[in-house]
Amino acid sequence: MTEKNLDSRLAIALLLIRVGVASVFIMWTIDKLLNPEHTARVFAAFYMIDSLSVTASYIIGAIQMVVVLAFLAGAAKKYSYMAIFVMHLISSLSTYERYFDPWTGTNLLFFAALPMLAGCWALWSLREHDSILSFDSMRAKGG
């Protein structure tokens, strides 16, 4: 395999990871904007914030949407990719009790967060190679 072929395959793999991760974050973000009551229940259950207001859910959702869209566009990769990783790390850590009791209810589904977290880290650490449909890469090439 040539180096150019490897670079191309890596860029495609990173694009697919970016789109996959973004699709999950977009759904979570839309939920914050369309279903703030659910957001309040999630924050109460996992973040020990018992009285998240509808306005706070909208503000969190709006800020998160900006970050997610920057991430999806491959813009400000150093910051947007790290922000996505940190948001998902916090989300994954806040549900740690579910990992100790995987066979109860829907707890097994929480394990899907771990490969996604690894993908977020891979994207951040390999961000210079994530060049397909990436605003930062297009700007660096002058196009």
Image (cartoon, rainbow, N blue to C red):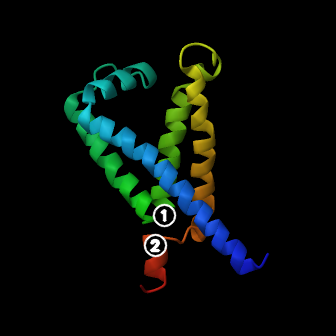
**In the drawing, does residue 53 fall left or right of residue 99?**
left
Residue at image point 55% right, 58% down: 16
Q: Label 2, on which residue?
A: 136
The image shows residue 124, relative to residue 116, as above or below, that is below
Amino acid of disc 2: Asp
The image shows residue 69, relative to residue 90, as above or below, that is below
Q: Residues within 10 Å of mark 2 (few under 14, many from 20)?
A: many
Q: Which image quarter is the C terminus in? A: bottom left
- Secondary structure beneath label 1: helix
**Label 2 with label 1: CB-CB less than 8 Å:** yes
- Which quadrant of the figure has residue 125? bottom right
Residue at image point 60% right, 23% down: 108
- Secondary structure beneath label 2: helix
Q: Which mark is residue 77?
A: 1
Residue at image point 34% right, 42% down: 29
Amino acid of disc 1: Lys
The image shows residue 53, relative to residue 76, as above or below, that is above
Q: Residue furthest bottom?
A: 142
